[in-house]
Image (cartoon, rainbow, N blue to C red):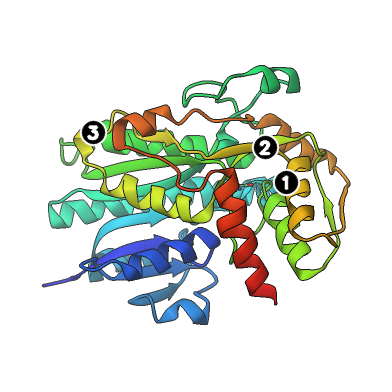
Protein backbone atom coordinates (compact mmCIF):
# COMPACT_ATOMS: atom_id res chain seq x y z
CA UNK A 1 0.00 0.00 0.00
CA UNK A 2 1.33 3.46 -0.89
CA UNK A 3 1.40 5.62 2.16
CA UNK A 4 1.79 9.39 2.04
CA UNK A 5 5.18 10.71 3.07
CA UNK A 6 4.87 13.28 5.85
CA UNK A 7 6.90 15.28 8.34
CA UNK A 8 5.51 14.85 11.86
CA UNK A 9 5.65 17.71 14.37
CA UNK A 10 4.60 16.93 17.94
CA UNK A 11 3.71 19.80 20.26
CA UNK A 12 3.17 21.79 17.10
CA UNK A 13 0.90 24.36 18.71
CA UNK A 14 3.72 25.76 20.84
CA UNK A 15 5.79 28.71 19.71
CA UNK A 16 8.60 26.67 18.17
CA UNK A 17 5.95 24.62 16.35
CA UNK A 18 4.31 27.71 14.87
CA UNK A 19 7.66 29.05 13.69
CA UNK A 20 8.60 25.70 12.18
CA UNK A 21 5.26 25.27 10.38
CA UNK A 22 5.57 28.75 8.89
CA UNK A 23 9.05 28.01 7.57
CA UNK A 24 8.34 24.50 6.31
CA UNK A 25 5.21 25.62 4.48
CA UNK A 26 7.33 28.15 2.58
CA UNK A 27 9.88 25.59 1.39
CA UNK A 28 9.20 23.89 -1.96
CA UNK A 29 9.48 20.12 -2.42
CA UNK A 30 9.00 19.32 1.25
CA UNK A 31 6.78 16.46 2.32
CA UNK A 32 3.56 17.83 3.84
CA UNK A 33 3.43 18.49 7.57
CA UNK A 34 1.28 16.47 9.92
CA UNK A 35 0.91 17.87 13.41
CA UNK A 36 0.10 16.16 16.66
CA UNK A 37 -0.79 18.32 19.63
CA UNK A 38 -2.91 17.66 22.67
CA UNK A 39 -4.47 21.11 22.24
CA UNK A 40 -5.00 20.88 18.47
CA UNK A 41 -3.64 23.64 16.25
CA UNK A 42 -4.62 27.32 16.20
CA UNK A 43 -7.05 28.13 13.36
CA UNK A 44 -4.63 30.63 11.83
CA UNK A 45 -2.10 27.82 11.24
CA UNK A 46 -4.43 25.15 9.89
CA UNK A 47 -4.12 26.02 6.21
CA UNK A 48 -0.34 25.51 6.42
CA UNK A 49 -0.45 21.86 7.43
CA UNK A 50 -1.67 18.69 5.76
CA UNK A 51 -3.37 17.21 8.78
CA UNK A 52 -3.90 18.03 12.44
CA UNK A 53 -4.28 15.26 14.96
CA UNK A 54 -5.54 16.24 18.39
CA UNK A 55 -3.97 13.67 20.64
CA UNK A 56 -1.54 12.66 23.33
CA UNK A 57 2.00 11.37 22.75
CA UNK A 58 1.31 8.95 25.62
CA UNK A 59 -1.44 7.29 23.55
CA UNK A 60 0.39 4.32 22.01
CA UNK A 61 -2.68 3.21 20.06
CA UNK A 62 -2.77 6.56 18.31
CA UNK A 63 0.96 6.43 17.51
CA UNK A 64 0.57 2.93 16.03
CA UNK A 65 -2.22 4.18 13.78
CA UNK A 66 0.01 6.98 12.52
CA UNK A 67 2.74 4.54 11.50
CA UNK A 68 0.27 2.33 9.71
CA UNK A 69 -1.30 5.17 7.75
CA UNK A 70 1.67 7.41 6.86
CA UNK A 71 5.31 7.18 5.96
CA UNK A 72 6.89 9.55 8.46
CA UNK A 73 10.26 10.65 7.11
CA UNK A 74 11.20 13.22 9.75
CA UNK A 75 9.95 13.83 13.28
CA UNK A 76 10.33 17.16 15.04
CA UNK A 77 9.50 16.09 18.58
CA UNK A 78 8.68 19.40 20.24
CA UNK A 79 6.03 18.28 22.75
CA UNK A 80 7.20 18.86 26.34
CA UNK A 81 6.29 20.42 29.65
CA UNK A 82 8.73 23.31 30.15
CA UNK A 83 10.83 23.96 33.22
CA UNK A 84 8.53 25.94 35.53
CA UNK A 85 5.49 23.78 34.74
CA UNK A 86 7.57 20.66 35.28
CA UNK A 87 8.48 21.72 38.84
CA UNK A 88 4.77 22.03 39.68
CA UNK A 89 4.04 18.54 38.34
CA UNK A 90 7.32 16.57 38.23
CA UNK A 91 5.72 13.14 37.72
CA UNK A 92 3.52 14.42 34.90
CA UNK A 93 6.62 16.05 33.40
CA UNK A 94 8.43 12.74 33.56
CA UNK A 95 5.59 10.99 31.75
CA UNK A 96 5.34 13.56 28.97
CA UNK A 97 9.03 14.44 28.62
CA UNK A 98 10.53 10.96 29.10
CA UNK A 99 7.88 8.35 28.26
CA UNK A 100 6.53 10.58 25.49
CA UNK A 101 9.99 10.81 23.94
CA UNK A 102 10.58 7.06 24.19
CA UNK A 103 7.18 6.50 22.53
CA UNK A 104 8.17 8.71 19.61
CA UNK A 105 11.57 7.01 19.31
CA UNK A 106 9.76 3.66 19.17
CA UNK A 107 7.50 5.07 16.49
CA UNK A 108 10.62 6.03 14.52
CA UNK A 109 12.01 2.49 14.90
CA UNK A 110 8.74 0.99 13.65
CA UNK A 111 8.57 3.44 10.80
CA UNK A 112 12.10 2.72 9.62
CA UNK A 113 11.47 -1.01 9.84
CA UNK A 114 8.50 -0.66 7.50
CA UNK A 115 10.10 1.75 5.03
CA UNK A 116 13.64 0.38 5.22
CA UNK A 117 14.92 3.94 5.51
CA UNK A 118 16.23 5.86 8.51
CA UNK A 119 13.84 8.29 10.13
CA UNK A 120 15.28 11.65 11.14
CA UNK A 121 14.40 12.51 14.72
CA UNK A 122 14.96 16.16 15.66
CA UNK A 123 14.84 16.85 19.39
CA UNK A 124 15.07 20.31 20.95
CA UNK A 125 16.97 20.15 24.20
CA UNK A 126 17.77 23.05 26.46
CA UNK A 127 20.18 25.12 28.51
CA UNK A 128 18.23 23.53 31.38
CA UNK A 129 20.41 20.40 31.11
CA UNK A 130 23.17 22.42 32.79
CA UNK A 131 23.47 22.64 36.54
CA UNK A 132 26.01 25.17 37.75
CA UNK A 133 26.97 24.36 41.34
CA UNK A 134 26.81 27.99 42.56
CA UNK A 135 26.61 31.57 41.29
CA UNK A 136 30.35 32.18 41.63
CA UNK A 137 31.10 29.19 39.38
CA UNK A 138 28.37 30.28 36.96
CA UNK A 139 29.76 33.80 36.68
CA UNK A 140 33.39 32.70 36.38
CA UNK A 141 32.85 29.87 33.87
CA UNK A 142 33.82 30.43 30.25
CA UNK A 143 31.10 29.51 27.72
CA UNK A 144 30.05 25.99 28.71
CA UNK A 145 30.62 23.05 26.33
CA UNK A 146 28.19 20.19 25.76
CA UNK A 147 29.80 17.79 28.21
CA UNK A 148 30.47 20.18 31.09
CA UNK A 149 28.28 20.82 34.15
CA UNK A 150 25.51 18.47 33.02
CA UNK A 151 24.07 17.94 36.47
CA UNK A 152 20.66 19.58 36.14
CA UNK A 153 18.57 20.53 39.16
CA UNK A 154 15.14 20.58 37.51
CA UNK A 155 12.88 17.74 36.41
CA UNK A 156 12.74 19.32 32.95
CA UNK A 157 16.54 19.50 32.66
CA UNK A 158 16.88 15.90 33.82
CA UNK A 159 14.19 14.79 31.37
CA UNK A 160 15.84 16.60 28.44
CA UNK A 161 19.27 15.19 29.29
CA UNK A 162 17.77 11.70 29.39
CA UNK A 163 16.06 12.37 26.04
CA UNK A 164 19.43 13.29 24.52
CA UNK A 165 21.06 10.12 25.79
CA UNK A 166 18.14 7.93 24.77
CA UNK A 167 18.25 9.38 21.27
CA UNK A 168 21.98 8.62 21.08
CA UNK A 169 21.23 5.08 22.26
CA UNK A 170 18.57 4.55 19.59
CA UNK A 171 20.87 5.89 16.88
CA UNK A 172 24.12 4.15 17.79
CA UNK A 173 23.48 1.25 20.14
CA UNK A 174 19.88 0.02 19.93
CA UNK A 175 19.59 -3.65 19.11
CA UNK A 176 16.68 -5.90 19.73
CA UNK A 177 18.58 -9.07 20.42
CA UNK A 178 15.59 -11.31 20.16
CA UNK A 179 14.30 -9.68 17.06
CA UNK A 180 16.34 -7.88 14.44
CA UNK A 181 20.03 -7.93 15.24
CA UNK A 182 20.73 -4.67 13.43
CA UNK A 183 20.88 -1.07 14.28
CA UNK A 184 17.62 0.82 14.28
CA UNK A 185 17.04 3.32 11.54
CA UNK A 186 16.71 6.28 13.89
CA UNK A 187 18.84 9.26 12.91
CA UNK A 188 18.61 11.35 16.08
CA UNK A 189 19.86 14.93 16.17
CA UNK A 190 19.43 17.29 19.10
CA UNK A 191 20.00 20.99 19.70
CA UNK A 192 20.44 22.54 23.12
CA UNK A 193 18.68 25.87 22.91
CA UNK A 194 19.15 28.88 25.16
CA UNK A 195 16.06 30.92 26.14
CA UNK A 196 14.07 31.64 22.97
CA UNK A 197 12.40 34.98 22.35
CA UNK A 198 9.68 35.33 19.73
CA UNK A 199 8.08 38.57 18.55
CA UNK A 200 4.81 36.90 17.62
CA UNK A 201 4.09 34.23 20.23
CA UNK A 202 4.45 33.75 23.99
CA UNK A 203 6.00 30.78 25.79
CA UNK A 204 4.03 28.74 28.29
CA UNK A 205 5.54 27.49 31.51
CA UNK A 206 9.25 28.12 30.94
CA UNK A 207 11.68 29.95 33.21
CA UNK A 208 13.42 32.04 30.56
CA UNK A 209 9.96 33.54 29.95
CA UNK A 210 10.80 36.80 31.76
CA UNK A 211 12.56 38.13 28.66
CA UNK A 212 9.65 37.76 26.21
CA UNK A 213 7.13 38.66 28.95
CA UNK A 214 8.94 41.92 29.70
CA UNK A 215 8.98 42.93 26.05
CA UNK A 216 5.41 42.01 25.22
CA UNK A 217 4.06 43.64 28.42
CA UNK A 218 5.88 46.91 27.62
CA UNK A 219 4.52 46.95 24.06
CA UNK A 220 0.99 46.39 25.40
CA UNK A 221 1.42 49.17 27.98
CA UNK A 222 1.10 46.72 30.88
CA UNK A 223 3.27 46.74 34.02
CA UNK A 224 5.63 43.77 34.45
CA UNK A 225 7.20 42.32 37.59
CA UNK A 226 10.26 40.34 36.54
CA UNK A 227 10.64 37.12 38.55
CA UNK A 228 14.46 37.14 38.58
CA UNK A 229 17.05 39.64 39.87
CA UNK A 230 18.44 42.24 37.42
CA UNK A 231 21.92 40.66 37.55
CA UNK A 232 20.65 37.24 36.40
CA UNK A 233 22.27 36.28 33.08
CA UNK A 234 21.49 33.40 30.73
CA UNK A 235 21.95 32.92 26.98
CA UNK A 236 19.16 33.75 24.54
CA UNK A 237 18.30 33.44 20.87
CA UNK A 238 15.73 35.06 18.59
CA UNK A 239 13.09 32.63 17.37
CA UNK A 240 13.94 32.87 13.63
CA UNK A 241 17.47 31.66 14.40
CA UNK A 242 16.09 28.76 16.46
CA UNK A 243 13.86 27.65 13.58
CA UNK A 244 16.72 27.93 11.12
CA UNK A 245 18.95 25.90 13.44
CA UNK A 246 16.35 23.11 13.56
CA UNK A 247 16.09 23.03 9.77
CA UNK A 248 19.87 23.14 9.33
CA UNK A 249 20.57 20.30 11.75
CA UNK A 250 17.82 18.25 10.05
CA UNK A 251 19.48 18.91 6.71
CA UNK A 252 23.14 18.46 7.72
CA UNK A 253 24.92 15.50 6.06
CA UNK A 254 25.11 12.70 8.63
CA UNK A 255 28.82 12.17 8.05
CA UNK A 256 29.56 15.74 9.12
CA UNK A 257 28.00 15.22 12.54
CA UNK A 258 30.45 14.13 15.21
CA UNK A 259 27.87 14.28 18.01
CA UNK A 260 24.15 13.70 18.49
CA UNK A 261 23.66 16.86 20.57
CA UNK A 262 24.91 20.37 19.83
CA UNK A 263 24.76 23.64 21.75
CA UNK A 264 23.43 26.57 19.73
CA UNK A 265 23.31 30.08 21.11
CA UNK A 266 23.40 33.74 20.22
CA UNK A 267 23.73 36.38 22.97
CA UNK A 268 23.86 36.43 26.77
CA UNK A 269 22.84 39.30 28.99
CA UNK A 270 21.45 40.03 32.45
CA UNK A 271 17.73 40.66 32.99
CA UNK A 272 18.49 44.27 34.03
CA UNK A 273 20.03 44.97 30.64
CA UNK A 274 17.01 43.50 28.88
CA UNK A 275 14.88 45.89 30.96
CA UNK A 276 17.09 48.82 29.88
CA UNK A 277 16.69 47.93 26.20
CA UNK A 278 12.93 47.55 26.64
CA UNK A 279 12.66 50.89 28.47
CA UNK A 280 14.57 52.71 25.76
CA UNK A 281 12.22 51.30 23.10
CA UNK A 282 9.05 51.76 25.18
CA UNK A 283 9.75 54.73 27.48
CA UNK A 284 6.53 54.28 29.46
CA UNK A 285 7.39 50.64 30.33
CA UNK A 286 6.80 49.86 34.02
CA UNK A 287 9.27 47.12 34.90
CA UNK A 288 9.95 46.06 38.47
CA UNK A 289 12.02 43.18 39.86
CA UNK A 290 10.31 40.80 42.28
CA UNK A 291 12.44 37.65 42.33
CA UNK A 292 10.53 34.42 42.86
CA UNK A 293 12.80 32.17 44.97
CA UNK A 294 12.22 28.91 43.08
CA UNK A 295 12.26 30.39 39.58
CA UNK A 296 15.34 32.44 40.51
CA UNK A 297 16.99 29.22 41.71
CA UNK A 298 16.26 27.51 38.38
CA UNK A 299 17.78 30.31 36.30
CA UNK A 300 20.76 30.60 38.68
CA UNK A 301 21.53 26.93 37.97
CA UNK A 302 21.70 27.49 34.21
CA UNK A 303 24.99 28.58 32.68
CA UNK A 304 25.48 32.22 31.69
CA UNK A 305 26.94 31.37 28.28
CA UNK A 306 26.99 28.31 26.04
CA UNK A 307 29.83 27.27 23.77
CA UNK A 308 28.46 26.39 20.33
CA UNK A 309 31.79 25.90 18.57
CA UNK A 310 31.02 22.23 17.78
CA UNK A 311 27.91 23.28 15.82
CA UNK A 312 29.90 26.00 14.05
CA UNK A 313 32.62 23.54 13.10
CA UNK A 314 30.49 20.54 12.10
CA UNK A 315 27.55 22.03 10.24
CA UNK A 316 28.35 25.72 9.86
CA UNK A 317 25.98 27.06 12.52
CA UNK A 318 25.96 30.82 12.92
CA UNK A 319 23.18 32.97 14.41
CA UNK A 320 21.93 35.76 12.16
CA UNK A 321 20.47 37.77 15.03
CA UNK A 322 23.06 39.00 17.49
CA UNK A 323 21.87 41.10 20.44
CA UNK A 324 21.54 44.27 18.43
CA UNK A 325 19.75 42.78 15.42
CA UNK A 326 17.54 40.57 17.61
CA UNK A 327 16.11 43.53 19.51
CA UNK A 328 16.31 46.37 16.99
CA UNK A 329 15.54 44.59 13.71
CA UNK A 330 13.31 41.72 14.82
CA UNK A 331 11.78 41.91 18.30
CA UNK A 332 11.01 45.58 18.92
CA UNK A 333 9.68 46.54 15.46
CA UNK A 334 7.59 43.35 15.08
CA UNK A 335 6.15 43.54 18.59
CA UNK A 336 5.40 47.24 18.24
CA UNK A 337 3.45 46.63 15.04
CA UNK A 338 1.57 43.75 16.56
CA UNK A 339 0.08 45.79 19.41
CA UNK A 340 -0.66 49.06 17.66
N1 LIG B 1 12.79 28.11 27.75
C1 LIG B 1 12.77 26.84 28.40
C2 LIG B 1 12.29 26.94 29.77
O1 LIG B 1 12.40 28.01 30.31
C3 LIG B 1 14.14 26.26 28.42
O2 LIG B 1 14.19 25.18 27.59
O3 LIG B 1 11.85 25.99 30.31
The Cα–Cα distance between marks 2 and 1, rounded to whole angstroms, is 7 Å
Which is nearer the eye, 41 or 313?
313
Say above or below: 3 vs 280.
below
Name the residue tied to disc 2: 269
Name the residue tied to disc 3: 256
Whether residues under marks 1 and 3 lie with C-beta atoms below 8 angstroms apart, the answer is no
Q: Secondary structure at mark 2?
A: strand
Instruction: Using residue 212 as the reference point, say whether residue 168 is left or right of it.
Output: left
Local crowd size for mark 2, using a 10 Å CA cut-off: few (<14), some (14–19), many (≥20): some
Numbered mark located on residue 274 in the image = 1
Residue positioned 33% across, 33% down in the render: 169
Residue positioned 81% across, 47% down in the render: 227
Q: Quadrant of the N terminus?
A: bottom left
Q: Position of residue 159 (x, y in %)?
A: 54, 40
The Cα–Cα distance between marks 2 and 3, rounded to whole angstroms, is 32 Å
Say above or below: 216 vs 104.
below
Local crowd size for mark 3, using a 10 Å CA cut-off: few (<14), some (14–19), many (≥20): few
Residue 99 in sight: yes
Residue positioned 56% across, 34% down in the render: 129
Instruction: Using residue 128 as the reference point, say whether residue 190 is left or right of it.
Output: left
Residue 295 in sight: no
Please identify, in this view, whether the residue under mark 1 or under mark 3 is nearer the observer.
1
Amino acid sequence: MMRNKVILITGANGEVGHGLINQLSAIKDMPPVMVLDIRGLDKSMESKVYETIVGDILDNGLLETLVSEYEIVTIFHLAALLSTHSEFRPEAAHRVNVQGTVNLLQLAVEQSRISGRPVKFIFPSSVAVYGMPDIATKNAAPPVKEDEFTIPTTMYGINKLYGEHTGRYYTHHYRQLADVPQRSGVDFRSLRFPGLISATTMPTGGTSDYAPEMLHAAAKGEPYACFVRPDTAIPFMAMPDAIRALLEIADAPRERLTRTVYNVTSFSLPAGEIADIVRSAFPSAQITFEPHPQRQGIVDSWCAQMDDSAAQRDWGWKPEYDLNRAFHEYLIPTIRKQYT
